[in-house]
Image (tube, rainbow, N blue to C red):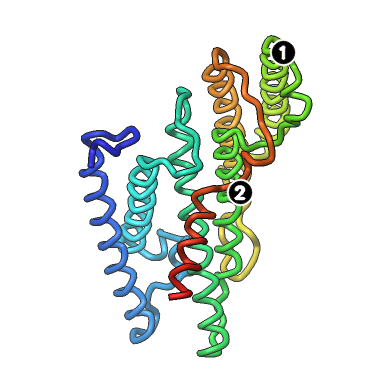
């Protein structure tokens, strides 16, 4: 198992066990809270989940378990490289991979939240006040982390038609200019948005709805923090790619051979 480890090595198994344990405890506590909500008047609900002071120690325990589950799951999943993913070779790549796994988990969480809303609304005629806002809250972080992952994978926009025609020294010059522009953009964004982000975060500004989550108070600071991570990743890419041989690209590079092979196997199994 450790032979397939990307970076955890001997920590892979303990991280896996911690992930399974936290996930199981989270699921048990979730079922208990849902059961209480159904059968006990005034039980803890989603309103209290974003207000730990009102929900008491049980809400704090639940939120801590959710955070630990996401952390250990992201760490464990980042220890495996996908078939079309680039090998991490920069000093910042591992952190970006961990964040990317958190973004992937977020997609599943959004699906679960929306599925719950659909069933609750159309089967039991009991629409929620929180599903839409929670999905928006999660999606905001999903898009931010996805940008960091795209930078790590070199999947951001680059005009290869021109880039491939350049000599290596000109490619390096273009890369340096790109990173400098990214750094300048980050500096301007922080310069203009820091005070506003701090005000929103310190007063934990809410969304102003019935559920009233702290979307502005968390997302605005997160934008500044993650754009810094994207910038560091861009610098990491520049350093890692500096001495690499020139690469040439063509449309065939965008074809996912693994996915095509999986589709072919699925079609063959369906014919049987």
> Mark 2 or mark 1, which is nearer to you?
1
Q: Residue 139, percent across and down?
A: 59, 56
Secondary structure under tag 2 reads helix
Q: Which quadrant holds the C terminus?
A: bottom left
Tell me: residue 100, above or below residue 131: above
Q: What residue would you read off at disc 1? A: 167
Q: What residue would you read off at disc 2? A: 143
Tell me: residue 92, above or below residue 257: above
Q: Residue at x 29, y 74 (%)?
A: 32
Q: Is residue 208 left or right of residue 117?
A: right
Res. 94 image quadrant: top left
Q: Residue 36, percent across and down?
A: 33, 79
Q: Nearer the viewer, residue 20 or 197?
A: 20
**Crowd class of label 1 (few under 14; some 14 to 19; many from 20; radius 10 Å):** few
Res. 66 image quadrant: bottom left
Q: Is residue 265 left or right of residue 4?
A: right
């Amino acid at each position: 198992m450790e032979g397939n480890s990307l970076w955890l090595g001997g920590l892979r198994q303990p991280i896996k066990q911690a992930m399974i344990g936290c996930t199981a405890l989270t699921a048990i506590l979730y079922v208990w809270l849902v059961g209480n909500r159904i059968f006990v008047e005034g039980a803890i609900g989603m309103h209290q989940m974003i207000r730990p002071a009102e929900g008491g120690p049980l809400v704090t325990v639940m939120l801590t378990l959710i955070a630990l589950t996401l952390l250990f799951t992201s760490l464990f999943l980042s220890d495996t490289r996908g078939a079309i993913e680039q090998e991490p070779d920069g000093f910042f790549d591992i952190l970006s991979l961990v964040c990317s796994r958190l973004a992937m988990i977020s997609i599943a969480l959004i699906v679960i939240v929306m599925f719950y809303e659909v069933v609750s609304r159309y089967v039991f005629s009991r629409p929620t006040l929180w599903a839409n806002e929670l999905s928006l809250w999660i999606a905001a972080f999903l898009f931010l982390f996805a940008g960091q992952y795209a930078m790590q994978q070199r999947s951001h926009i680059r005009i290869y038609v021109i880039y491939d025609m350049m000599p290596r020294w000109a490619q390096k010059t273009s890369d340096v200019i790109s990173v400098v522009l990214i750094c300048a953009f980050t500096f301007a964004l922080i310069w203009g948005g820091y005070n506003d982000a701090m005000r929103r975060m310190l007063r934990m500004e809410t969304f102003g709805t019935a559920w009233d989550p702290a979307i502005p108070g968390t997302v605005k600071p997160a934008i500044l923090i993650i754009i810094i991570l994207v910038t560091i990743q861009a610098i990491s890419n520049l350093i890692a790619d500096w001495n690499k041989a020139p690469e040439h690209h063509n449309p065939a590079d965008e074809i996912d051979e693994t996915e095509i092979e999986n589709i072919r196997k699925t079609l063959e199994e369906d014919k049987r």
